[in-house]
Image: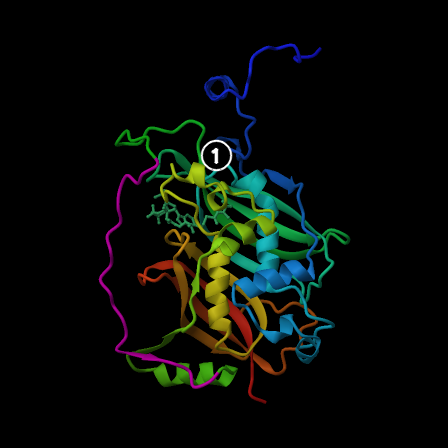
Amino acid sequence: MTDDTDPTDWTDPETFRAALDRADTREKGTYFEAFAEGDRIEHDPGIRLSRAGNERWMAQTLNHDPTFWRSDAAAERGYDEPPIHPDYLLAATMGPSVEDLSEKGGYFLGRTGVRYRTDAVYPGTELRVDSTVIETRASGSRPDYGIVTWETTGRDADTGDALLSYRRTNMIPRREPIETDGGQTTGDRVDAGTEPEPELPDTLLTPDGQHFEDFSDALDDADGRDAAVAYRHERGRTIDDALLAGLPLATLNTAKQHHDAATMADSPSGEPVVYGDVTRSIALGHARSDERTYRELGYDDERFHDFVTAGDTVYGFTRVLDASETPTIDVPSGVDATDAGAVRFEHVAFNQNETPVYSGTRTALIETRN
Ligand SMILES: C/C(=C\C(=O)SCCNC(=O)CCNC(=O)[C@H](O)C(C)(C)COP(=O)(O)OP(=O)(O)OC[C@H]1O[C@@H](n2cnc3c(N)ncnc32)[C@H](O)[C@@H]1OP(=O)(O)O)C(=O)O
């Protein structure tokens, strides 16, 4: 059977528009209704973690710790060679899951329980990624969306060993919007939250240096008085195309939010938005440039508060929550933590208008002075 004798010029603009009007779309992604708690999804795409991909991510997000670039610096931290950066591993685990989980649209709201299961992942490792639906619920404020939480694990494709896992929550469009009490069926909020009154301590302290003792001493200094250890980082990073579309696509993240300007024109942001993992990696890169990081252990309570779009500049702010010789998060086996202590931070990414766009806690081992 052939259609070659058809005299119609399908590329005539009017004819083509009529064809588009009548044609079905071969859809990508999954609507909210299709997710059921307990479902396990093995994602088909996977990434071979390359040194080039790693270096591209780190360079663009200002994660310039020599450990991840130079053999001598890597050896000093107990690695065989410069390993894959934890932020790149996280983004490269999330990227291949997007096609099945969130490509339909909606926004990445938050993530918690990010845990590294192994000390070092080296270039050449191939990733396999799977997810389980943990929770689905209606959005009370947006009838066009549901809210889904998945547990995702990135594994070494050769051994099946878990390298990283986390729980992530997204808004996901419904195929059929639901009626709310107000009967509203748009993507807009039904109710707006009230802003809490600012309630800050009198004094914000900055640690004297970048070692574990500097964070610990600053917390001791703040203890018992109306003070907190909290400071901003000087660097900023303006969003350009390398960050906006380049980095998510390099991790196989197919979320249209980052690379389909025409579709996004008709969305709440009105334009493409930056991949959440890029925003947080920039803010964490700013923070790490002001500390002697030994190992990343995990992240919790991550929230994406507002859109970041082209031309915005991402800055970082850090609050030190806790410093202890013994981490509250499991340290992967093989890590020699003798010369480091655990610090728990809250990091906030904010834009040029001083609006928070991301926040989350992070636990890292920070080198002691020796
Ligand atoms: C990857 C990937 C996509 C991306 O990376 S997109 C880029 C990163 N994300 C964003 O840019 C989103 C930035 N956030 C916003 O602009 C706003 O938060 C948003 C999405 C417009 C919602 O604003 P609201 O003021 O309506 O926010 P609410 O705090 O009221 O939240 C709305 C409902 O969501 C629930 N929720 C929020 N955060 C969480 C969380 N961490 N865990 C669980 N649930 C959360 C909240 O309770 C509200 O629920 P309702 O029942 O009241 O609707 C990709 O696609 O994969």
Which image quadrant: the C terminus?
bottom right
Foreground residue among 221 and 87: 87
| Position in image of residue 153 (x %, y %) | 62, 51
In magenta segment, residue 125: no
Looking at the image, which residue is at 71% across and 61% down?
123
Instruction: Give the residue at mark 1.
Output: 32
Inspect this view and state whether residue 102 appears: yes
Q: How is the image coloured?
A: rainbow
Looking at the image, which residue is at 77% across and 52% down?
158
In the image, residue 348 sits, relative to residue 41, either above or below, namely below
Foreground residue among 121 and 58: 58
In the image, residue 330 sits, relative to residue 104, either above or below, namely below
| Position in image of residue 89 (x %, y %) | 62, 58
- Main SS of the magenta part reads loop
* Residue at far left of view: 197
Looking at the image, which residue is at 26% across and 49% down?
193
In magenta segment, residue 191: yes
Foreground residue among 116 and 290: 290
**How many neighbours does mark 1 have within 10 angstroms: few (below 14), some (14-19), or many (20 or more)?**
many
* Residue at far bottom of view: 370
* Amino acid type, label 1: Phe
Q: Which residues are magenta?
A: 187-209
